[in-house]
Image (cartoon, helix red, strand yellow):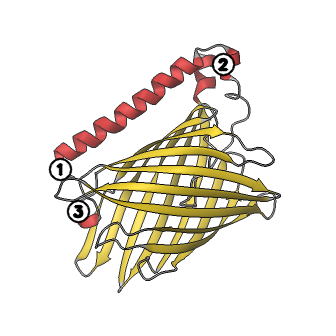
Amino acid sequence: MNPLRLFVVTTFVLTWIALGLAVARASAEESPSSREGCGGRVISVPSRPTVTSATDTTQCGVVEIEYGLERQWPGGGANRDDLSGGLRFGVTPNLDLHWSSSAFLHVMDDSGNRTGFGDTWIGLRYRFLKQTKLRPSMGVLYSAKVGSARLGLGGTDRVDHAIAFLASKDVHRVHFDFNLIPQWAGRAGASGFDYNTGLALSSAIPVTRRWGLVAEGYGYTSLNEENPAFASIMLGCTYAASSRLVFDSGTDVGATSGAPRKRAFVGVTYAIGNVYSWMRAR
């Protein structure tokens, strides 16, 4: 990564973290009634392993960390290894901050072997309707990509934007999440944006007190000539070692010719603790 790009990414991330801490401090100093729902037992609210985002936000005041390692086989003898993860912070019972990046990328294809840092994403998720017996919960997730990956690793050195419209519903023991995801991707070496839309639907069902199964279908319309429309199907499982610590694993396969042929992954989510409680204790 060139020094200017590193400076921009670092400044952007630190500004976002500072904003989150400032909001946390302000919220910690509010009256107890205004912090309703921001205390109690710390639990993890994983966003892994699905592409689909739930309307459930990170528990209020809690900082969560998640990381995953995956290998992707796009086809034609190529493969891609990705170690990625990030942090989430529950600002209020209905609002959380997201930061994620690919800490390590390795790509092997006809152009050779390349290794480096991936792109960085910053986001805000807000749930504006809670679930009722007849109505799903609904929310929105805005994400912006700060270009930190080299062009040879799929980066564009441009800012991308995505707005996901979220809906979640429990039907008996099965939990469903649905996303509609318009995206604007900055063009490499040119002005303007390419545009596409994603659709994702996932379902999760507990099998035992600790084990759960996850199934998902997702896909995107064509972005440009290099990125055609595709659809994929994912099957995975989760294991809750405790209320704070959740492991996941799974695989997905391409359902159309434009999709990566296969992907396998493992990951972990851990709820570190409640920042608001720490501040009140001080």
Q: Nearer the viewer, mark 2 or mark 1?
A: 2
Evaluate if marks 3 and 1 touch, with contact meaning CB atoms under 8 Å apart. Answer: no
Kindly identify the residue that appears in the image at 30 percent across and 68 percent down: 224
Tag 2 secondary structure = helix
Q: Which mark is residue 2?
A: 1
Residue 264 lies, with reference to residue 243, above or below; the image says below
What secondary structure is marked by label 1? loop
Question: What is the spatial separation of the Cα atoms under label 2 and label 1, in whole angstroms?
Answer: 45 Å
Q: Residue furthest front?
A: 134
How many dots with numbers?
3
What residue sits 70% from the left and 29% below the top? 37
Q: Residue 179 is drawn in which quadrant?
A: bottom right
Does residue 104 appear left or right of residue 71 in this picture? left
Task: Report which residue position mark 3 lands on.
Answer: 151
Q: Pick whichever of labels 2 and 1 is earlier in the sequence.
A: 1
Counting from the top left corner in percent of width and height, residue 157 is at 23, 53
Q: Secondary structure at mark 3?
A: helix
Q: 211 or 141, which lies in front?
A: 141
> Amino acid type of disc 1?
Asn
Lateral position of residue 169 relative to residue 28, left or right:
right
Whichever of callouts 3 and 2 sits on the residue coming sooner in the sequence is 2
Q: Nearer the viewer, residue 67 or 95?
A: 95
Disc 2: which residue: 34
Q: Amino acid at mark 3?
A: Leu
Q: Position of residue 57 (x, y in %)?
A: 61, 42
- Comes first in the chain, label 3 or label 1: 1
